[in-house]
Image (tube, helix red, strand yellow):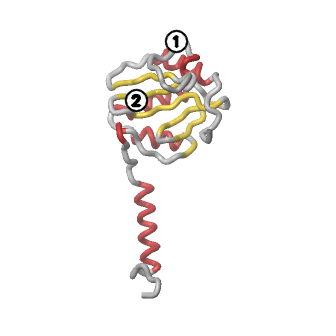
Amino acid sequence: MGGRVSNKSATARKTSTKRARTTRATAKPRLLSGGNPQIAKADGDAAVQAYIAAMPGWKRDVGRHLDALISATVPGVRKAVRWNSPFYGTELGWFLNLHCITRYIKVAFFSGTSLTPVPPVGSTHQGTRYVHIYDGDELDEALLASWIRQAAQLPGWASFSS
């Protein structure tokens, strides 16, 4: 057989590879433990919208609402997906991210201890505070917008590489 690995012709291999790439590109994102969508690392609104579209059940509508609130509160907000979570930032750094947990959405404010009032849920990461949003919760938009506005004006994560 002299080094032959497959009986497929070169044309058949190319067609098969192309079909596999197309299937991967159009496949529905996999949900990780807790129902968090697995989305490839990317910068920009399209990646964040792909994450939101893949959020399960009621979380999708809340995700859309949060994204719209963040975008309206911080014009020109930067967006990216890293570690299967959408991040939001300004020229001062990344200030907020979202993550799906089994029963709630976790909203992380990276400089949360500097916000007034301080978001309710503590963290093991110094400075970070969380808001957990459960199915059926009525969002206090004024308070969320206030936290978003404050957080966007504080220094955040400088980059994802550190």
Badge 1 density bin: few <14, some 14–19, many ≥20, Cα 10 Å: few
**Residue identified by numbered label 2:** 105
Question: Can you tell which quarter of the image residue 126 is in?
Answer: top right
User: Where residue 20 sits in the image (x, y, percent)?
Assistant: 42, 64
Indicate whether 142 appears above or below 128: above
State the SS at label 1.
loop
Quarter of the rendering occupied by the C terminus: top right
Front residue (pair 127, 130): 127
**Residue identified by numbered label 1:** 117
Question: Can you tell which quarter of the image residue 96 is in?
Answer: top right
User: Where residue 36 sits in the image (x, y, percent)?
Assistant: 39, 39
In the image as oriented, which residue stretches furthest toward the top? 117
Front residue (pair 55, 111): 111
Mark 2 to mark 1: distance in Å? 20 Å
In the image as oriented, which residue stretches furthest toward the bottom? 1
Q: Answer left or right for 107 relative to 92.
A: left
Indicate whether 97 appears above or below 40: above
Q: How many labels does the image show?
A: 2
Badge 2 density bin: few <14, some 14–19, many ≥20, Cα 10 Å: many
Front residue (pair 58, 111): 111
Say which residue appears at 35% left-offset and 37% top-offset: 34
Indicate whether 14 appears above or below 26: below
Upstream in sequence: badge 2 or badge 1: 2
Residue type at mark 2? Ile
Say which residue appears at 44% left-offset and 16% top-offset: 140
Residue type at mark 1? Pro
User: Where residue 119 sits in the image (x, y, percent)?
Assistant: 48, 17
